[in-house]
Image: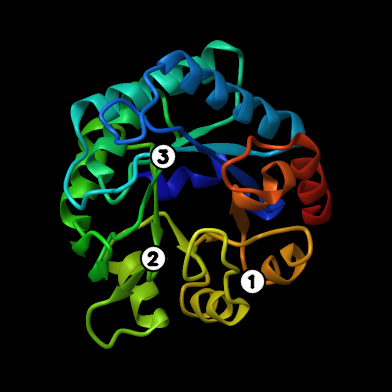
């Protein structure tokens, strides 16, 4: 089971930095520009910047594929993400790879991890249900954990608690949601974010989740930057970051290796 070997992949006591590779629009997406070569070149450049800057892992997302659906993504999306992952490996990047298939296609993410030697997957809604711009999204922990066991038992399931860009259905507080996700959904690590991409994660939310699930590795899922990293890491075990590490802090820009170095430096 992945939870038993999590420290073999990332040393949580070292407060890892996980850099997100935001893939440009993939084939089939409305904004696809017609060139997988350009998509892969951008992904490789971002991955190399993270590695050179001192990140401990990389998470690959189909971030450019707006608008997202709430069902499984198309086969061409999965194939494109696999090609991008292969391109990153082909240039010698040795960092552990993770996959997040938006909006909530963890089944495809597990397939990618199994075929691309991934180390973890992120699932936005693992237990419970939320209302998002895609409609109602329900967690499928039962299916997810069993598929992982069948295909890639060593891959970690990193699950959001009350995920961003969504509101929970029902009167469920963050502590109860965290407990369900970790203890009943059997997630290997928990993620707490702000309300949207790039928005700061609440320190009080982190404190509540860590207090409820002290043995769960806890990651910040949005809004981490040099100015607040210390406060966040008082309770969190690592940071998942993209927005603040882009050139000039602009989400659509490539990753800036100097910004990665600066953030990593204040985390040590």
Q: Which of these two is toward me, 185 or 249?
A: 249
Q: Residue furthest bottom?
A: 171
Camera-nearest label, 1 or 3: 3
Marks 3 & 2, CB-CB < 8 Å contact: no
Instruction: Give the spatial CA distance, label 3 vs label 2.
Output: 16 Å
Q: Position of residue 259 (x, y in %)?
A: 77, 44
Within 10 Å of disc 2 (Cα), the crowding (few <14, some 14-19, many 20+) is: some
Query: For mark 3, what is the residue?
Result: 64
Within 10 Å of disc 1 (Cα), the crowding (few <14, some 14-19, many 20+) is: many
> As drawn, is 174 to the left or to the right of 131?
right
Earlier-in-chain disc, 1 versus 3: 3
Q: Position of residue 100 (x, y in %)?
A: 38, 43
Q: Name which quarter of the figure residue 266 lies in.
A: bottom right
**Residue 165 numbered mark, or none:** 2
Earlier-in-chain disc, 1 versus 2: 2
Please name the residue shown 65% across and 60% down the image.
224
> As drawn, is 242 to the left or to the right of 53?
left
Camera-nearest label, 3 or 2: 3
Q: How many marks?
A: 3
Instruction: Give the spatial CA distance, label 1 vs label 2.
Output: 23 Å
**Residue 235 numbered mark, or none:** 1
Instruction: Give the spatial CA distance, label 1 vs label 3.
Output: 31 Å
Q: Is residue 195 above or below residue 154?
A: below
């Amino acid at each position: 089971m992945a939870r038993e070997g999590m420290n073999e992949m990332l040393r949580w006591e070292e407060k890892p930095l996980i850099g997100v590779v935001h893939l440009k629009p993939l084939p089939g997406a409305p904004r696809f520009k017609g060139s997988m070569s350009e998509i892969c070149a951008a992904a490789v450049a971002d991955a190399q910047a993270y590695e050179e800057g001192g990140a401990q892992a990389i998470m690959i997302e189909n971030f450019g594929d707006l608008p997202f659906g709430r069902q499984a993504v198309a086969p061409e999306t999965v194939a494109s993400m696999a090609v991008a992952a292969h391109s990153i490996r082909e240039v010698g990047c040795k960092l552990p790879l993770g996959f997040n298939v938006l909006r909530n296609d963890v089944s495809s993410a597990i397939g990618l991890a199994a075929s691309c030697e991934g180390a973890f997957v992120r699932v936005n809604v693992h237990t419970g249900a939320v209302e998002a711009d895609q409609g109602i999204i329900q967690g499928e922990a039962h299916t997810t954990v069993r598929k992982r066991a069948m295909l890639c038992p060593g891959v970690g399931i990193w699950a959001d608690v009350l995920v961003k860009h969504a509101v929970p259905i029902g009167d469920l507080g963050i502590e109860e949601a965290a407990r369900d996700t970790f203890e009943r959904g059997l997630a290997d690590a928990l993620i707490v974010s702000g309300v949207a991409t790039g928005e700061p994660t609440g320190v009080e939310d982190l404190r509540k989740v860590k207090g409820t699930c002290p043995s769960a590795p806890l990651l910040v899922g949005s809004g981490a930057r040099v100015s607040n990293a210390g406060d966040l890491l008082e309770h969190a075990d690592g940071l998942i970051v993209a927005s603040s590490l882009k050139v000039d802090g602009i989400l659509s820009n490539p990753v800036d290796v100097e910004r990665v170095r600066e953030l990593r430096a204040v985390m040590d």
